[in-house]
Image (cartoon, rainbow, N blue to C red):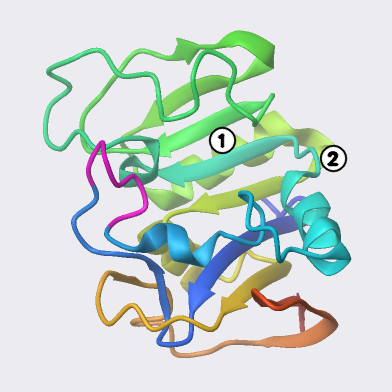
Amino acid sequence: MPGKVPDTTCHMSISLDGFVAGPDQSREDPLGKRGRELHGWHIGDPRANDADKVANEWLMRPRGAYVMGRNMFGPIRGGWDEEWTGWWGPEPPYHAPVFVLTHHAHDPIQMEGGTTFYFVTGGFDAAYAAACRAAGDKGVDIAGGASTVRQALIAGVIDELTLDITPVLLGSGERLFDGVEFFGFEPAEVLHSPLTTHIRYRRVR
């Protein structure tokens, strides 16, 4: 794997019991059952405050390339047996190359606004290396979901990890830290709202 880009980021909303998505993802529940409860701070809850606005700016800051898992891209499992271009409509919010981890090859999908989805069958390291090459000095973001972030944490490539810790217990779903044996970050900034506590961690050098 090539040397890391100057800044590889990851930003995830997480429940108190460690889940970043609920169980049973589907077209009707892209974040799994009750998964939306983790995201009220940036999808319309009237209790959101200035801290949530700042955290949303962190979340939406432009990056040079993204890495995401197949489950985050869509609900289709197995072979690509239907047309699917992601959850986000004709103009996804990325505006950069997005490298999707999958076991099933797929031609790139070019979307409006500068987003192109590339499908990588060679595993996390191959996807991250491709993202680094595409991003140049603009940085890479590990967009999710849980499995992809776990692989990035175990590989030690994340420089900045932001967690939006929501006072919700999901009980089941996709855990973020299962199998991650070393954290290696320290808090750099903490913001509070009635909906969540935003902690921006930086890797300990």
Secondary structure beneath dot 2 equals: helix
Q: Nearer the viewer, residue 48 or 19?
A: 48
- The amino acid type found where label 2 is placed reads Asp
Q: Residue at x 12, y 27 (%)?
A: 79
Q: Which residues are magenta?
A: 26-32
Vertical placement of residue 68 versus 79, above or below: below
Q: Residue at x 22, y 38 (%)?
A: 103
Q: Position of residue 142 (x, y in %)?
A: 58, 52
**Toward which corner of the image does residue 94 lie, by quadrant?**
top right
Q: Position of residue 154 (x, y in %)?
A: 47, 73
Residue denoted by label 1? 130
Vertical placement of residue 91 versus 12, above or below: above
Predominant SS of the magenta segment: loop
Q: Does the rendering let one see residue 166?
A: yes
Q: Nearer the viewer, residue 204 or 80?
A: 80
Q: Does the rendering let one see residue 1?
A: no
Secondary structure beneath dot 1 equals: helix
- Real-space CA distance between mark 1 and mark 2, rounded to the nearest whole angstrom: 13 Å
Q: Quadrant of the C terminus?
A: bottom right
Residue denoted by label 2? 137
Q: Residue at x 32, y 41 (%)?
A: 70
Residue 170 horizontal side relative to residue 190, left or right: left
Determine crowd level at label 1: few under 14, some 14-19, many 20+ residues with C-alpha closer than 10 A. Answer: many
- The amino acid type found where label 1 is placed reads Ala
Residue 130 horizontal side relative to residue 100, left or right: right
Residue 198: mark in rendering: none
Q: Position of residue 160 (x, y in %)?
A: 74, 68
**Toward which corner of the image does residue 100 lie, by quadrant?**
top left
Residue 57 covered by magenta stretch: no
